[in-house]
Image (spheres, rainbow, N blue to C red):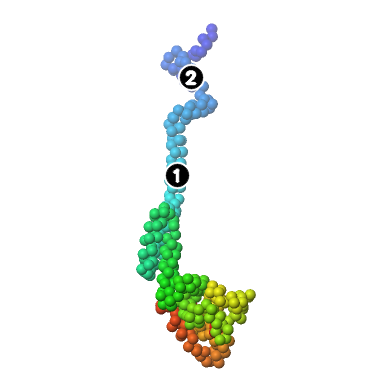
Amino acid sequence: MGEPEGVRAKGNTGSDRRKGVSPDRGAAAPAAPAWDGVERRRVDRRRLATGSEAGERRSGRERRGLMYHVRDFATRFREPLVGMGMAVAALPLIKTGPSARHRAGQAPTELAQAAPEAAASAAGTGEPNRDVDAEVGSRWNDAARTSTIQAAVNRYGISSQLATSIYDHARNEGIDPKLAYGLVKTESAFNHTAVSNVGARGLTQLMPGTASWMAPGTSARDLFDPETNLKLGFHYLHHLIDRYRGDRHLALTAYNRGPGTVDRAVSRGRNPDNGYAGMVLGNALRGSAGTAGGAGQPGG
């Protein structure tokens, strides 16, 4: 008679051990499920999904790898970023520091007083990026202009309007205003209608031919206009200073005697000085005659 279904005979065989049958008992144990590759992969996936040891080890390695890359990135880029931040923060100091220290050793009283006023004005108007250097320089120039014009009024007894015109035209043409006052005083004694015995006219005593050479279309009558005369006279003075490479004595002498006469004397080894340059410098305002000063073309 055959064996009941699911029951095996006694025997200590490998087959029995695999099937779950005890070698010492005749009773058969329930059969274990088949342990094939498909089932193992399913168990591994379940363990990984539920946080099993293998899954935890794998996710831990992944986390450690990510942290390593983050630390490496921070190490490589932290110092350049910090250095860049410090450089940006120092830009305002770089802009204002050296120039302020340089001026501190050389600034006159007016400039020293203007600096805190300009800074206070910038703070009061809420403009932190305001160019204080430019404002201080502008105030200093205004103060120097006002002081020089007033000194000319006091010394020469001329009107404030004429003193201002001489100052502004001289500066515009690159001439030191102090020297310009001396030139006008020597040439015309500040008389805008003056005419020399050779026909030179106006404040700077320009010859009509010289004026028309510099500004074609300028008439002899135009030279009686103070603004026209000062502009052309100082322009020609600058031209002569450039011609004689900054030598004010030669330029002033050429303004009086003419550049042709001066050039011939110099080429023959003679001194062309006739005392005119000394007169102009003596009539100039006291103080520096300036580095840009000069004289125009032949006067009367």
Query: Given the current orientation, which residue lies at the most extreme top position?
Result: 1
How far is the residue under mark 1 from the one under mark 2? 49 Å
Amino acid carrying mark 1 in the image? Val
Task: State the residue at coordinates (44%, 59%).
Answer: 131
Q: For marks 1 and 2, give the one nearer the viewer.
A: 1
Is residue 223 something one can see in this rendering?
Answer: yes
Q: At which x and y percent is residue 244?
A: 53, 82
Q: Are marks 1 and 2 in contact (CB under 8 Å)?
A: no
Q: x, y (%) of residue 211?
A: 59, 78
Does residue 270 sit above or below 172 in this rendering?
A: below
**Considering only vertical position in the picture, is 153 above or below 252?**
above
Q: Quadrant of residue 266?
A: bottom right
Left or right of 27 on screen, residue 227: right
Q: Element at badge 2? A: loop
Q: Nearer the viewer, residue 173 or 158?
A: 158
The residue tagged 1 is 70
Q: Which residue appears at 46% of the width and 73% of the height?
A: 159
**Image point 51% across, 85% down: which residue?**
253
Quadrant containing the N terminus in the rendered view: top right
Coordinates of residue 6 in the picture (x, y in percent):
51, 13
Which residue lies under the disc numbered 2?
A: 32
